[in-house]
Image (cartoon, helix red, strand yellow):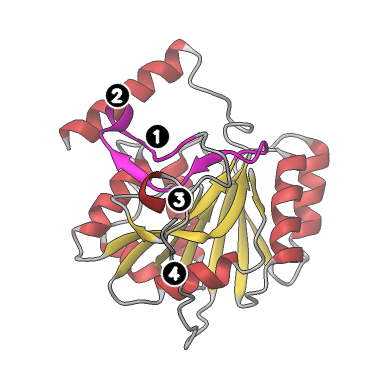
Amino acid sequence: MDSVLSLRWPLLESPLVSIIIPTRNGLALVKNCIDSILDKTTYSNYEILLVDNNSDDKEAIEYFAFLNTHEKVRVLQYPHEFNYSAINNFAARQAKGEVLALVNNDIEVISEEWLSDMVGHVNRADIGCVGAKLLYPNNRIQHAGVVMGYGGGAGHAHKHFDVDHLGYMNRLIATQNYSGVTAACLLVKKSDYWAVDGLDEDNLTVAFNDVDFCLKILQLGRRNLYCAEAHLYHHESVSRGYENTPEKAMRFQREVQYLKST
């Protein structure tokens, strides 16, 4: 097979990274997510902003209160209707870091250097959004870059391929540019985030807000990047479920149409 170089960009600067994790209840997911970040991440200059969106589970609320005492964690209250874009924008306004990391509550760290590898790229002046290699719990690919047009709007490259697969032209194991990456685990400079007014909380409340965001970042003259070295599990759709009700399906179709027309 052809050889592929894995380049680790030097961390000449180690900016504070604000890791934003929205949740509603989800005690087991949140604990697994945050424990894996705290226990495994070698990059040390980060804060975690856990955004509680109307949790009503007593044990979850108690755990969040306990987390709020941790030196690296702040728990923010967002007492409004679920709107993924608005929740992240709300937290981004309170973030202290120069770099924002949008992270789902169903993410679990695998590679200890995940944040170091991603920060090394996001530090580069010409790079906008940086995404990770995300795996399903069965060790098949969930995300390795977003391709426009796939599935009618945008879709994940190499979805369900085995973790050891090289991908088309080695694209699963090679860090490279893509039109977009998923906000299930996405790093971006805070200055770039606000240069495009953050996520679109008016038109894209749940789906495709990350794709729209990445396309706006491209218009700044940045390149979006899939970081093949950063490995994490993504227990996808465990917390919110699938688009399996008439209301969710209608909202999803509106957001697909908005993405296409915009």
Residue 254: which disc?
2
Spot occupied by residue 169 in the image (x, y as percentages of width and height): 36, 50
Q: Give yes or no for contact between labels 1 and 3 (Cβ–Cβ under 8 Å).
A: no
Tell me what residue is drawn at x 44 percent, y 69 percent.
5
Look at the numbered disc 4 and give the secondary structure of its residue: loop
Mark 3 or 2, nearer chain start: 3
Residue kind at label 1, given as amino acid type: Ala
Residue at 73 percent of width and 72 percent of height: 71
4 and 3 marks in contact (CB < 8 Å)? no
Q: Quadrant of residue 56?
A: top right
Residue at image mark 4: 5
For residue 18, say whether it is visible: yes
- Mark closer to the observer (4, 2): 4
Foreground disc of the pair 4, 3: 4
Give SS at disc 2: helix
Q: Secondary structure at mark 3?
A: loop
The range drawn in magenta is: 136-159
**The label number, if any, that marks residue 172 in the structure image:** 3
Q: Quadrant of the C terminus?
A: top left
User: Does the magenta run of residues contain 149?
Assistant: yes
Type of the residue with mark 4: Leu
Separation of marks 1 and 3 at Cα, in angstroms: 24 Å
Q: Amino acid at mark 3?
A: Leu
Q: CA distance from mark 2 to mark 1?
A: 10 Å
In terms of secondary structure, where does tag 1 sit? loop
Q: Residues within 10 Å of mark 2 (few under 14, many from 20)?
A: some
| Label located before the other in sequence (1 or 4) | 4
Which residue appears at 47% of the width and 36% of the height? 159
* Number of the label disc, if any, that sits on residue 207: 1
Q: Residue at x 58, y 38 (%)?
A: 140
Determine if the magenta segment contains residue 170: no
Q: Say above or below: 135 vs 129.
A: above
